[in-house]
Amino acid sequence: QVQLVESGGGVVQPGGSLRLSCAASGFTFSSYALHWVRRAPGKGLEWVAVISYDGSNKYYAASVKGRFTISRDNSKNTLYLQLSSLRAEDTAVYYCARAYCSGPTCYSPQHWGQGTLVTVSS
Amino acid sequence: QTVVTQEPSFSVSPGGTVTLTCGLSSGSVSTSYYPSWYQQTPGQAPRTLIYITNSRSSGVPDRFSGSILGNKAALTITGAQADDESTYYCVLYMGSGIWVFGGGTKLTVL
């Protein structure tokens, strides 16, 4: 079955950087787009970024564009999110999610990992 | 900037039917927004209920259904149960690769 396991979360100072990873198994990793979604304490879900199956297309929420970078290594079945210039409001649980795909077209998140907590604090 | 709107809270009696909606601050939701619905309880990862408007995710009971009602996407729960008490989120495709979640609806079953 589809499994997604996030790692790399922790406590980081404002202005700092962190790289999150998402190890995938149970499906053909290189055939699916992948999303990052976060949930800040006391807030709702926020879509962060998506990357196409081959990494050629990447899209970001306005709140993170220019600070976060999504990438993938299809040889390692791993998705990444590089977080830079971190702010207190980036504190959240970060989830990776596999998209629902029909043929070459992928859509919204469908299968979810358990998340990893990022805390931005001095 | 267009905002995705959901009712902040809703209440339903056990065994009752409730319809949660997902709209836009400007404009109408259609199937071209590929609405999806998720359930999240505290401390848990989101669970996908419905994707691309009305496709039910594997293992989701058929008392959960998705549709377009008027100018909004809708999630209908028939025969509500106590463990349906949760927060429900919709997400819409806004074009140019961008997805936006609604603020969520906290459903109480009592």
Image (spheres, rainbow, N blue to C red):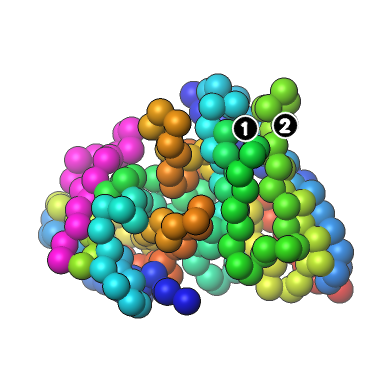
Q: Residue at x 32, y 59 (%)?
A: B85
The kind of secondary structure element at disc 1 is loop
- Residue B51 point in image, percent of width and height: 33, 45
Magenta-drawn stretch contains B66: yes
Question: Is the residue A5 above or below the residue B50 in the image?
Answer: above
Q: Identify the chain of the residue marked 1, using the numbered disc in the image.
A: A
Q: Identify the chain of the residue marked 2, using the numbered disc in the image.
A: A
User: Can residue A45 be spotted in the picture?
Assistant: yes
The kind of secondary structure element at disc 2 is strand
**What label does residue A73 carry, if any?**
2
- Residue A22 point in image, percent of width and height: 67, 39
- Precedes in sequence: disc 1 or disc 2: 1
Q: Residue at x 61, y 58 (%)?
A: A60
Question: Is the residue A56 above or below the residue A87 in the image?
Answer: above
Question: Is the residue A108 above or below the residue A119 in the image?
Answer: above
Q: Quadrant of the C terminus of chain B?
A: bottom left
- Position of B93 with respect to B75 (left or right) is right
Magenta stretch, residue numbers: B54-70
Badge 1 is on which residue?
A: A54
Are discs 1 and 2 located on one and the same chain? Answer: yes
